[in-house]
């Protein structure tokens, strides 16, 4: 699989920093030589054609630029450092075995169910509403959650609104899910959602999804446009339902231990680079959606559900809130609930 190593700075500059030699110019000299250099690893769940990967590469470019080449980021797609297992990848981040990752809160929720609050079904109507809630209270709540797990949350990127694909028939009403075998990420909330719709949910790492769809082990899956597109899933799926049923941000996390080892100046560099990279990745993800939808229509039957059709799904999934709010806790759910 492709590995991208983003490192800005000439070899001569690196040599100066390592040897402690002085020099002239901004960012050089003895002051620069006294600062630590870092060679960090970062993983994303999907491949190198995704906006996740592009955002991670942008993060590496910004780190190198803002640190005068002291900070190097190695980007690994498809969870290569954890054998394709996103949950194991998050555990690596929490334990300090790697520095950074982009991961969905769905993956974090396998460790702590409170993380799934922001992925409650039909919680947000659109991107503008999600942006407003995250900026007001959601991000701070998730920073606290992440820190409890040994992760410094540097902000949210975005996977997008999640959609439904399958190989059997169009899905336009809740009853259409019955008896279909769907891959879901390792989240108890998603397993409960699909069971409540009469489907047979199967927890599976994303790295296995394409082959499992191809050989008929599963009938369908659910993901945002960018993941469906970058994963090549239209090759093995015939039907796409644009349901926008879950908003899925991305946690740009850093090992908290590694964060705490940084100087205040270097923490500021990392945070500034993260803010700019997340903004870049989100814009790219949203900008690509219309183009991706056009291409999907060439390969699949695409059903863009009406407000009335979506209302039926909202009603069918509403009972989940009663059983799941105690697991999310009122504190976390209130922080992401647009109704508050």
Image: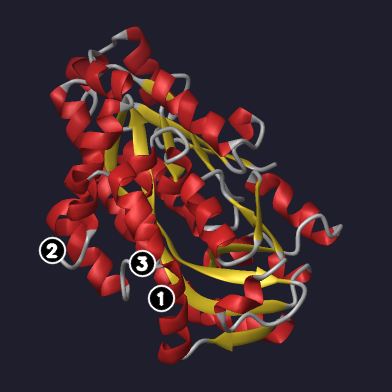
Closer to the camera: disc 3 or disc 2? 2
Q: Which mark is residue 258?
A: none
Residue at the spot x=25%, y=73% of the render?
128
Local crowd size for mark 3, using a 10 Å CA cut-off: few (<14), some (14–19), many (≥20): some
Residue 290 place in picture, x, y as percent: 49, 81
Local crowd size for mark 1, using a 10 Å CA cut-off: few (<14), some (14–19), many (≥20): few
Q: CA distance from mark 2 to mark 1?
A: 20 Å
Closer to the camera: disc 3 or disc 1? 1
Residue at the spot x=31%, y=69% of the render?
124
Residue holding disc 2: 340
Residue 227 horizontal side relative to residue 1, left or right = left
Towards the viewer: 150 or 277: 150
Residue at the spot x=31%, y=75% of the render?
125
Residue 297 place in picture, x, y as percent: 65, 86
Towards the viewer: 117 or 45: 117
Local crowd size for mark 2, using a 10 Å CA cut-off: few (<14), some (14–19), many (≥20): few
The quadrant in which residue 7 appears is top left
Residue 152 higher or lower than 163, as above or below = above
Closer to the camera: disc 2 or disc 1? 1
Pick whichever of labels 2 and 1 is earlier in the sequence. 1
Q: Which mark is residue 283?
A: 3
Residue 22 place in picture, x, y as percent: 24, 14
Residue 315 visible in rendering: yes
Residue at disc 3, secondary structure? helix
Label 3 close to label 1 by CB (< 8 Å): no
Residue holding disc 1: 315
User: Can you say which quadrant of the picture contains the N terminus?
Assistant: top right
């Amino acid at each position: 699989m492709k590995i991208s190593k983003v490192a800005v700075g000439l070899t001569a500059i690196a040599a100066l920093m390592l040897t402690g030699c002085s020099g002239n110019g901004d960012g050089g000299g003895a002051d620069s030589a006294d600062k630590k250099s870092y060679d960090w690893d970062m993983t994303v769940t999907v491949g190198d054609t995704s906006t996740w990967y592009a955002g991670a590469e942008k993060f590496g470019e910004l780190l190198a630029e803002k640190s005068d080449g002291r900070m190097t980021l190695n980007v690994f797609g498809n969870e290569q450092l954890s054998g394709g297992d996103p949950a194991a990848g998050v555990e690596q981040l929490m334990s300090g075995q790697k520095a950074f990752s982009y991961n969905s809160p769905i993956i974090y929720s396998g460790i702590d169910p409170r993380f799934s609050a922001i992925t409650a079904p039909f919680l947000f109507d659109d991107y503008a509403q999600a942006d407003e809630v995250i900026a007001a209270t959601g991000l701070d709540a998730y920073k606290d959650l992440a820190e409890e797990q040994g992760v410094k949350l540097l902000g949210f990127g975005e996977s997008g609104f999640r959609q439904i694909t399958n190989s059997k028939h169009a899905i336009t009403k809740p009853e259409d899910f019955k008896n279909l075998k769907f891959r879901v990420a390792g989240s108890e909330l998603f397993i409960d959602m699909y069971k409540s719709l009469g489907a047979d949910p199967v927890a599976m790492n994303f790295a296995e999804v394409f082959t499992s769809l191809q050989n008929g082990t599963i009938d369908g899956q659910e993901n945002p446009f960018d993941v469906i597109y970058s994963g090549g899933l239209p090759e093995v799926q015939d039907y796409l339902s644009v349901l926008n049923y879950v908003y899925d941000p991305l946690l740009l996390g850093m090992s908290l231990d590694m964060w705490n080892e940084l100087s205040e100046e270097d923490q500021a560099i990392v945070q500034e680079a993260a803010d700019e990279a997340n903004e870049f990745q989100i814009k790219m993800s949203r900008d690509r959606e219309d183009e991706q939808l056009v291409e999907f229509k060439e390969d699949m039957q695409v059903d863009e559900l009406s407000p009335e059709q979506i209302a039926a799904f909202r009603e069918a999934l509403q009972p989940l809130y009663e059983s799941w709010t105690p697991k999310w806790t009122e504190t976390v759910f209130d922080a992401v609930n647009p109704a508050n």
